Image (spheres, helix red, strand yellow):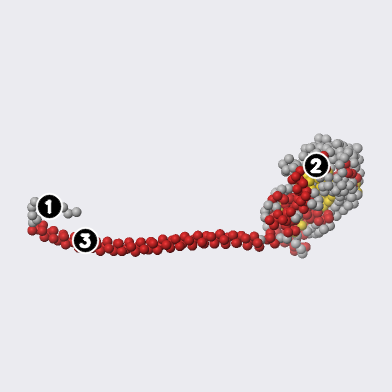
Amino acid sequence: MWVAPESSRLPSRDELAHGKVAIAALEEELETLHATVANQLSRKGSIQERLKALRHELGQLDDEIIGSQGRISDVENEIRERSRWIAAIRRIPNEVLGEVFVWHVRLDWKAPLVDSSVCKTWRTVALATPRLWSFLRLSEETGFLNPQLAQLWVQRARAAPLHVHINLEDVTEDILKVYRDTYCLKFRPWPTRLQNHSFPHLSKLILDHEDATLDHLERDVFMAMPNLRYLHLHWRMTHRPIVKWNWDLPPLDEFHFAGATWAWIDAVEQVAGTLKKLALDLGGVTAPPPASIPIRTLNLPNLRYFAYGAQSQSLMINDAARVPIVTRILNAPSVEVFEDHSLVPLELPLPVEDNWQFPNLKSYLGQTSRELADVKLLYPNVQTIAFLVDPETGVLDVATLIDDASDGALDALEILEMFQASALVGHPMIEQALRRYREERGKDLYLIFHSGRDETPYQQCFFGFPCCYHQPIGSYLSESLVDGE
């Protein structure tokens, strides 16, 4: 900013000329500044107009976005609805869906509550499937001790055969009366009030206990069940073993006996003529039998399914002394399915004459792949073999078995079902053996690989409650062979 000199004197000639020049320059600058301001004001107005237009456009875009988002939601909902409408589950006939529900309840007694809560259609199907409601578990935890809930289940089961598991320390007279018309009963522990009760429709009875005795049961307790065809007696770790069999049995189709005693001989002798399925778990019973139970031959002409051995792979019991005795006792030439849980050391194999004698065997459910050599020797006509793959020798065991089949050693072999078999899938030795089999035999060998061991013959063996739980493929094949389906 310019500052004037002292006001008391007059400007000199030079100051006057310089001031005029400065004023002219400032006036020129002022004119430029006015033009600049005018231009800026014009631009400001233009920008304000553009901002106004852009704000309007932004508002329109916001409205369009909201509309598009709403349409997105509608389209997604429609896609879901259309997908539900054409989903495979909707194309399943209600009858098939009902069968799926029935398989579910065999795995989990709460299945009726789960399945009937999914949607209206599933609830309709669930309520129209009586067998879904025919599996009851009575215990302190399930709630079926509530008479109203139990009655609701029974009403919805209608005429379907009832399968009732009773897991109570004290089974009252009232409970036995309510379920006297049941098709299948499982008690754990064994009840003390079975006598003086009639079960006219009972077909399957399972008595399961870790430490129990039959001494409290009357001799004719089983005869009060005229339609009883399946009897399971399990007392695995009892300190009170049965020394002598003192009970009468009706004609049975299926008999499971799990207990460390030779009294099974007397029991099986009563029903030898009718038995179709027999399962024995003798635990660590001392061999030979006591003098009170003489060894003799039991002829079982109709026996088709036989299971032997410990119910759990954790029970590492040497059966080398017991197997020859059981083999001498059982004369069952018609056995087609053998579930083998016997434990005999590989270094001390049994002679052929002391081993199992099943000349017509079609399906073998064994232990590990290490025993496959014995299977080839004992059962040359077997069609199906199921086993657990040994982690160390499994590949070689299976490849050798397939090569033996290629050479005609197992002429009838059709299926190998293997558990814990992930390492075998696509293995070069297995693939090479299969190619050779195909070339030599002119047909394919069907291999079934299970990656885990959750459903191995060990854990899903015939012992237990087969009417109420899922079985592996080997068991399905076994059932078909037995029933001739």
Q: Is residue 354 visible?
A: no
Numbered disc in front, either 2 or 1: 2
On the image, the x and y values in percent for residue 120 come to 68, 56
Q: Amino acid at mark 1?
A: Pro
Give the camera-side residue of 304 and 91. Answer: 91
How far apart in space, not on screen, are marks 2 and 1 (Cα)? 125 Å
**Residue at 86% across / 45% down in the picture?**
199
Residue beneath disc 2: 175
Callout 3 crowding tier (Cα within 10 Å): few <14, some 14–19, many ≥20: few
Please state the horizontal and vertical placement of residue 185, each as a whole percent of the image: 81, 45
Q: Nearer the viewer, residue 443 or 257?
A: 257
Q: Amino acid at mark 3?
A: Leu
Tags 2 and 1 touching, CB below 8 Å? no
Mark 2, Cα crowd under 10 Å, few <14 / some 14-19 / many 20+, is some
Q: Position of residue 129 (x, y in %)?
A: 76, 54
Which label's residue is closer to the chain start, 2 or 1?
1
Query: Which residue is labeled 1 in the image?
Result: 5
Inter-mark Cα distance, 2 to 3: 112 Å
**Residue drawn at the location 82% of the way across and 48% of the way down:** 183
Q: Residue at x 42, y 62 (%)?
A: 56
- Image position of 187 with respect to 472: above or below: above
Question: Helix, strand or loop at disc 3?
Answer: helix
Instruction: Indicate the position of residue 465 as horizontal and vertical percent values.
Output: 78, 47
Return the residue at label 3: 30
